[in-house]
Image (cartoon, rainbow, N blue to C red):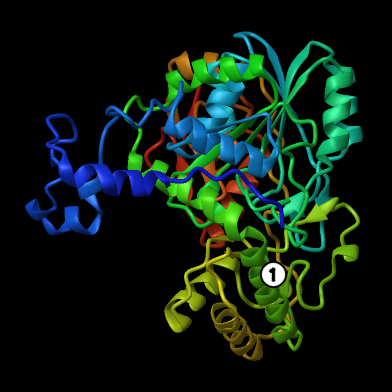
Amino acid sequence: MKEYDIPEESLLARLERRCPDELPMHMPGHKRNSALAPYLRRLNADIDITEIDGFDNLPRAKGVLRESMRLASELYGSHRTFYMVNGSTGGVLSGIHALTMPGDTALVARNCHMSVFHALGLRRLTAHFIEPEYDHSFEVVASMSPLIVERALVEHPETRLVVVTSPTYEGVISDIPAIARVVHEHEAVLLVDEAHGPHLDRSPYFTGSAVGAGADIVIHSLHKTMPSLTQTALAHVATDRKAQRFVEAMETYLSTSPSYLLLAAIDGCIRLMAEKGPELHEKWFDALMDFDERILPLEHLVVLCHGRDYLDAHPDFYRFDFSKLLISCLDTNLTGPELMNLLRSKYRIEAEMASSRAVLCMTGPGDTRESLSRLADALLDIDAGLKEESRRASAINTPHLLPDISISEAEERPWREVSLDEAEGLLCAEYIMAYPPGVPLAIPGCTITADTLDALRTRSDSGIKLKFSRSVDAETVAVL
């Protein structure tokens, strides 16, 4: 096991040492008086501080936070690592800002998160969208092909930035080393939204990280799969020059009063992974392997790349993150939302999300053989009561985006609401998505096509709630 230079005192220990003895004549207004209300005691307000002496400044850290981020950089093998306390969204916004100038051209994977599209609008970028491969057996997006990226770069030689999501929400990993080589050969830069991959390459059991694979910036949502608090994230930057630009962007998108409770969670997580990471990952992986054995009797439900479904059955997957459990009900009489509701109501299991014909369960180091056995037993019980059924129509493809004008221009034009039946052929004036996963089905400035409307209706009919950024309900849409 590799030895790391771990700072002697954790951020949490420093907070616990300093806070009891000092009179806080500064923010926040609770003044660390947990006796004010039960919620303050429950939330550890007694160690909740602002940026006071000895606790550094997050964007331009020189002391305790810099040392902690140095350890994170050493752990991940990055050139520079930054802590983010407004999630991977803040990292994506900062990263795209740091790598571009207003008016630049970006190539964006169609399955990117909403934060990428918001960054395109904020930065006034011209965007072209590239489609990953597609796996029809599970009706999920497969890996992004380096060849497809190269073709797009040849078609759009003015491209400055390429943005790819890897792994996907469902766990599909792309060949980032090959993509990075292609991008750099065309004198562009690469940002990888690896929000779902902070655990990758921390052990031999989960591999395929973009950090060290040639990407210019990699964003991790630390809380998604690691033992950290919600809203904590990391950004890994490849060079000093890009790091300086990233710091400047952080100061645009990051709160000037970052939560030290969240920073202590990041620091604690990094220290834990440096001290016990391989051991925790091995236990996690063993629990998943036990889960695979338990679900072998399933006859109707199928779990992607688990149980009887093997990775080699998916030739368009470069790699797969085995921490993800995507449970397909494609050939059954259940929809995804129905399966998710059944897990919740009968078995007290709350899944991460439901698509039209599948449910995603996420795992992490906090899972045990017992917790995953409980999920396996629930699936076996549900499976025993299912009937085989021919595949019904489902939203197998995210509709193509056909931009007529840029996002930023569309957001500034006057708009009106029309019924969905009247919308075909008009320019969309809003974002429409199922959240999670937060991949837009339509964006401002793109033509609403028959495929767009079909995707909206199919998802609604299966019980998935759609999120509209401007229109008041799912029966209307904002158009230009």
Q: Is residue 138 above or below residue 14?
A: below
What residue is drawn where x is 64% and y is 87%? 380
Image-quadrant location for residue 446: top right
* In this picture, residue 45 sits left or right of residue 129: left
Q: What residue is shown at x 59% (from left), y 65% (from top)?
A: 363
- Locate residue 214 relative to residue 373 in the image: left or right: right
Residue at x 84% of width, y 13% of height: 157
How many numbered markers are drawn? 1
Q: Position of residue 256 (x, y in %)?
A: 34, 24
Q: Which residue is mark 1?
A: 285
Which amino acid lies under the numbered mark 1 shown in the image of this protein?
Answer: Phe
Q: Nearer the viewer, residue 237 or 332?
A: 237
In the rendered image, the quadrant that contains the N terminus is: bottom right
| SS type, badge 1 | helix
Q: Residue furthest toward the front?
A: 8
Judging depth in this view, the residue of 460 and 183 nearest the camera is 183
The location of residue 141, given as percent across then percent down, is 75, 50
Q: Looking at the image, which is closer to me, 54 or 265?
A: 54
Confirm whether residue 22 shows in the render.
yes
Most extreme residue toward the left, as rendered?
36
Percent of width and height locating residue 313: 89, 65
Give the percent coordinates (x, y) of residue 201: 73, 51
Q: Residues within 10 Å of mark 1 (few under 14, many from 20)?
A: many
Residue 422 visible: no
Side of 318 where 98 appears, left or right: left
Q: Is residue 321 left or right of residue 45?
A: right
For image coordinates 79% across by 31% down, the residue present is: 214
Which of 35/461 is in front?
35
Which of the 4 image quarters holds residue 314?
Answer: bottom right
